[in-house]
Image (cartoon, rainbow, N blue to C red):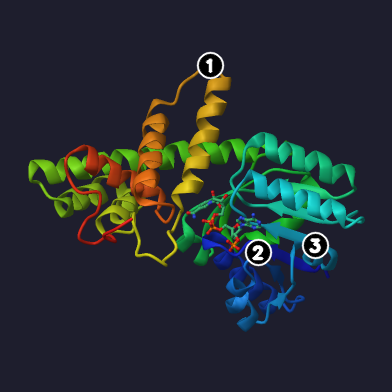
Amino acid sequence: MSQIGFYGLGSMGTGMALNLQKHLQDTKQPNLRYSNRTLSKGDCLKAARGIEEPDYISLVKSCDIIFTMISNDKVLNELVESALSTGSISGKIFVDTSTVHPNTVARASEKLTKAGASFVASPVFGASAVAAAGKLIFAMAGPKDTTEKLKPLVLNVMGRSIIDLGEEVSKSSMLKIAGNVMVIGLMELISEVQVFAEKVGLGTATMEGMIADMFGPVAESYSKRLTTGAYAPPHGTAPGFAVSLAIKDAKHAISIANDHDMRLNVSEAALSHMLNARAYAGESLDSSSMYGTVRHESGLPFWTENSRQSS
Ligand SMILES: NC(=O)c1ccc[n+]([C@@H]2O[C@H](COP(=O)([O-])OP(=O)(O)OC[C@H]3O[C@@H](n4cnc5c(N)ncnc54)[C@H](OP(=O)(O)O)[C@@H]3O)[C@@H](O)[C@H]2O)c1
């Protein structure tokens, strides 16, 4: 039986790894080995009988299939170099589920494949609550025999469905970035409409009811990030989807569009609002914090009564 490993226990990775460990236990497979830069974040996995590895290199050495869920391209590049530094990764399977640029996954695939390993790029759609519920959508690309082997570890374990994008790894990353053009654009639009509703006296609750009825639970959940104050969570509480990660995604989308002679005007507006929010209120903000900037630009305070009250 293969030994499975998981690296990256942030907002998304923790729920995914817990679901994976539960599946391995239920199906009497070896317990999940895990690691994270901040090891204490794995305490919940240890309590679920996961096995801690001190760092990524130890994890790679002890596992056959290694999932990663980390913040950005730079970290993935570092992990690839760490894996290569172990000397022998032939036959191992690396599955990155983060959101990174298509060129980054293409390079990772080339390097790992040259060393005799397989690489699958499988970014996911769904917020951290969806990850915890095991209902993510996986956009998967990589060698066919490898993606087939991974399906039982994903379907009804960490995810509700897999979008198969074939063997070219950059395709799944491209779909994820295209999907995030929608996500970030929708957040920008809902931010604007909620400020409009407040300014003209309709009120955000009335607007949220209409958004839910007309546009469904996803749009409603984005509106709730604003109205519950989750766009600027209390100090010490991690945001659901950190603003810096959404800034990375918007920048990737805008630069890819520019490479193809087009502009993403909505993404550009959202990016500018997110950058201003981060400059005004610091790192610890959700991707939806463009709402604070839209409020500010419209003569309202950046904060609401439900958000935190200071930078
Ligand atoms: N949150 C969402 O709603 C969502 C949805 C879909 C996709 N995504 C994508 O999924 C990925 C993870 O998102 P997340 O929300 O889980 O992010 P997160 O909570 O910020 O977690 C990031 C993870 O990367 C690790 N990390 C950061 N810098 C590192 C470094 N220099 N070396 C080693 N590890 C490092 C962190 O370790 P520490 O714990 O030590 O900080 C943590 O495990 C991102 O690419 C994001 O764009 C997020």
Q: Earlier in the sequence, mark 2 or mark 3?
A: 2
Residue 169 seen anywhere in this rendered image of the structure: no
Tell me what residue is drawn at x 60 percent, y 65 percent. 9
| Numbered disc 2: secondary structure | loop
For this orientation, the residue located farthest to the left is 201
- Residue 31's place in the image compared with 83, above or below, is below
Check disc 2 and give the amino acid type.
Answer: Arg
Q: Which residue is mark 2?
A: 37
The residue carrying pointer 2 sits among few (fewer than 14), some (14 to 19) or many (20 or more) residues within 10 Å by Cα, namely: some
Under circle 1, the secondary element is loop
Dot 3 surroundings within 10 Å: few (below 14), some, or many (20 or more)?
some
* Disc 1: CA contacts within 10 A as few (<14), some (14-19) or many (>=20): few
> Image check: 86 left or right of 185?
right
Q: Which mark is residue 102?
A: none
The image quarter containing residue 175 is top right
- Ligand 1 in which quarter: bottom right
Asked if residue 228 lies left or right of residue 36, the reply is left
Report how far apart the C-alphas of labels 1 and 3 lie in the structure: 41 Å
Q: How far apart are the alpha carbons under marks 2 and 3?
A: 12 Å
Read off the residue under disc 3: 57
- The residue that appears at 80% across and 49% down in the rendered structure is 81
Residue position marked by numbered label 1 in the rendering: 261
Provide residue 300's location: percent of width, then percent of height: 17, 45
Q: Say whether marks 2 and 1 touch (CB < 8 Å).
A: no
Q: Please state which of residues 22 and 190 is positioned toward the viewer in this rendering.
A: 190
Which residue is more in the foreground, 282 or 179?
Answer: 282
